[in-house]
Amino acid sequence: MKLCFIADARSPIAQNWISYFIQRGYEVHLISSYPCEEDLLPVKSLHVVPVAFSQVAKVRVVSNQGGAHYRSLSRPLNSSIATRILGTLRHWVGPLDVFRFVSRVRGMIEKMQPDIVHAMRIPFEGIVAAEALKDVSVPVIISVWGNDFTLFAQRFHLIGALTKRALKRADALHTDCYRDAHIARHWGFSSRKLAIVVPGSGAVRTDVFCLNDTMLVPSRRWDIPQGVHVVLNPRGFRGYVRNDTFFRSIPLILSARSDVLFLGVSMEGHPVAERWIRRLGVEHAVRLLPSVRHNEMAELFRLAHVVVSPSEHDGTPNTLLEAMACGCFPIAGDIESIREWITHGVNGLLCDPNDPQSLAQAVLQALDDTELRQNAREYNLRLITERADYREVMTKAEQFYREVLKSVTRIR
């Protein structure tokens, strides 16, 4: 099978998914919607199509020493104000920019002659795929990531209109939660077409993300004092993650317990994060970490007692599943997709992502209740094995590709 992916090649989620098919020996072509390193994945061909002004984005570069930083492939946006303006511009005007690249993408795909095109996310990869291939007979699979419907299609009218067109063109659908599989019908995806619900990244590589005491990293590597309880926020800065709630919960937690240390991944040097901890006077209890490698995230999850994800929009966050696989107790925003994985008070806690007090109470409950954390750990290890093992999930995805190819070929 010859495959063409249209994806943000910088995304660990996309990389995890695409890598499986490369390792399986398929001929894989990649059209990246963002500038990226040329040797990021060993694909047959790599093309960059910077839709919706993505050419100003920065590229993640991992050093030989294990850290990571970002460099821009064009002119960097140093101002947080400029970054916010760009974000607004992308979502209001970006859909129009897609049409500049339609003929280019069509030409690339006609030259590749793939058996399947898989667009990994609706805005803007699925939109450009649908517009480029509306009169081309190649089967198209579109993935829905957590915010495609509930945030972007709902909030931005043009994205919503193009979402409907994309789902009408799609031959098959991949969602990372059952909520989005149901919502897709409202946005025009036919119930007669094939669909699959599995984690967007292909789930958890349990050889890396696992509970293994022999793999515990020394606390001093992360500057963790002895005897503290670690609360980890792995989400970085995203428009739908309420980091303001996270930071404002810290003094509330510290007022009840002084033995807690908070880690924020991909927050080192971030001006917003630095302002929050200075304003709240909690510098002594917070470590702002850089972006880290995949295996280092596993080390952090094993080190932490609690992982928090105060998001108000989400599908199935990969960090949530990875934390659960490492035995870390999860606390997340109380939204429908998360309830597909967490039963409140059984294998995690749910909170109001808009309310610092709600998050603080959940963290304190988890830290105070050792039995709850232990029971949740055992429950979650079984859950990941049953529903989110990478090899089993990707075997299902591979079979799904074959079913799509067979079904579309028969119809056409």
Image (tube, rainbow, N blue to C red):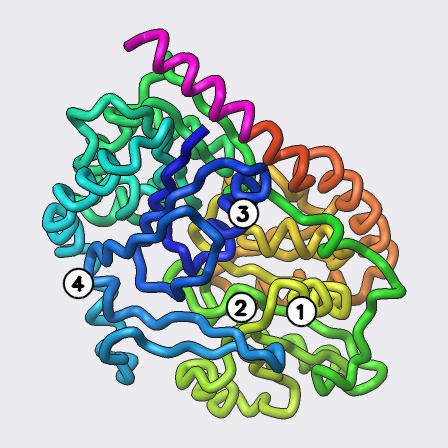
Q: Earlier in the sequence, mark 3 or mark 4?
A: 3
Residue 168 shows in the view: yes
Q: Residue 264 carries which label?
A: none
Question: Foreground: 389 or 370?
Answer: 389
Structural distance between the alpha carbons of marks 3 and 1: 19 Å
Relative placement, left or right, of 367 versus 140 is: right
Tag 4's secondary structure?
A: helix
Q: Could you tell me if the residues under marks 3 and 2 are in contact, i.e. CB atoms within 8 Å? A: no
Q: Main secondary structure of the magenta part?
A: helix
Mark 3, residue position = 19
Structural distance between the alpha carbons of marks 3 and 2: 39 Å
Q: Which of marks 3 and 2 is nearer the N terminus?
A: 3
Relative placement, left or right, of 273 versus 208 is: left
Q: Position of residue 321 (x, y in %)?
A: 64, 49
Q: Could you tell me if the residues under marks 3 and 1 are in contact, i.e. CB atoms within 8 Å? A: no
Amino acid residing under circle 3: Ser
Q: Could you tell me if the residues under marks 1 and 4 are in contact, i.e. CB atoms within 8 Å? A: no
Q: Does the magenta stretch include residue 404?
A: yes
Q: Which of marks 1 and 4 is nearer the N terminus?
A: 4
Q: Residue drawn at (43%, 82%), measured in percent from left and top?
A: 270
Q: Earlier in the sequence, mark 3 or mark 1?
A: 3
The span shown in magenta is: 398-412
Q: Where is residue 339 in the image (x, y as percent from the top left)?
A: 58, 40
Residue 114, quarter of picture: top left
Mark 2, residue position = 356
Q: Quadrant of the C terminus?
A: top left
Structural distance between the alpha carbons of marks 4 and 2: 30 Å
Mark 4, residue position = 89
